[in-house]
Image: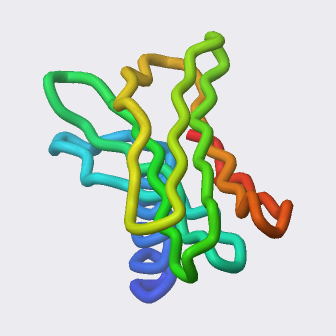
Amino acid sequence: MIRKRTAVRLAAVAAVATVGLGLSAGMASADTTFTANVPGCAGGMQVRFYSGHDHVQGYVTSTMGDACKVVLSQSNGGGSSAWTSSGTVRTQELLDAGITSYVVVCNLDLGRCATSASY
């Protein structure tokens, strides 16, 4: 027999794991963001669930006027990219159906890049 506190903790861990894997427990999945930030560029990948499928889109914001680029890549060879030196830009939104997606955000002025977690 497990104690009530242990049962509550196990339920919380299971809930976090379910959301983190993009699974649903009988309800619609919430939007999820995977960040990839470098000095001067704040970016990442957003995952949205609608019409019965996950959709992914990369984004980047130039926070200091530097040239920033985001590249969305998928394991099936698909991808999209965008860059800016002011404001925020987004990549094309792509369907993510059983494949792996991630983004790389780069500060082109500094030559530094960061990679998001994969989804």
Q: Residue furthest right?
A: 111
* Colour mode of the rendering: rainbow
Residue 2 visible in image: no
Looking at the image, residue 118 sits to the left or right of residue 61; the answer is right
Q: Residue furthest top?
A: 76
Q: Is residue 21 above or below residue 16?
A: above
Residue at point 65% right, 12% down?
77
Residue at point 56% right, 63% down?
35
Residue at point 56% right, 39% down?
119
Looking at the image, residue 109 sits to the left or right of residue 67; the answer is right
Q: Residue 15, percent across and down?
A: 39, 61
Q: Residue 8, percent across and down?
A: 40, 79
Q: Residue 32, percent across and down?
A: 38, 55
Given residues 12 and 111, the one toward you in this image is: 111
Q: Residue 25, percent across and down?
A: 27, 44
Corner quadrant of residue 39: bottom right
| Count of numbered circles in the view | 0
Q: Is residue 82 above or below residue 76?
A: below
Residue at point 48% right, 50% down?
45
Q: Is residue 31 above or below residue 64?
A: above
Looking at the image, residue 33 sits to the left or right of residue 108; the answer is left
Given residues 107 and 5, the one toward you in this image is: 107
Residue 26 visible in image: yes
Corner quadrant of residue 48: top left
Q: Is residue 15 above or below residue 6?
A: above
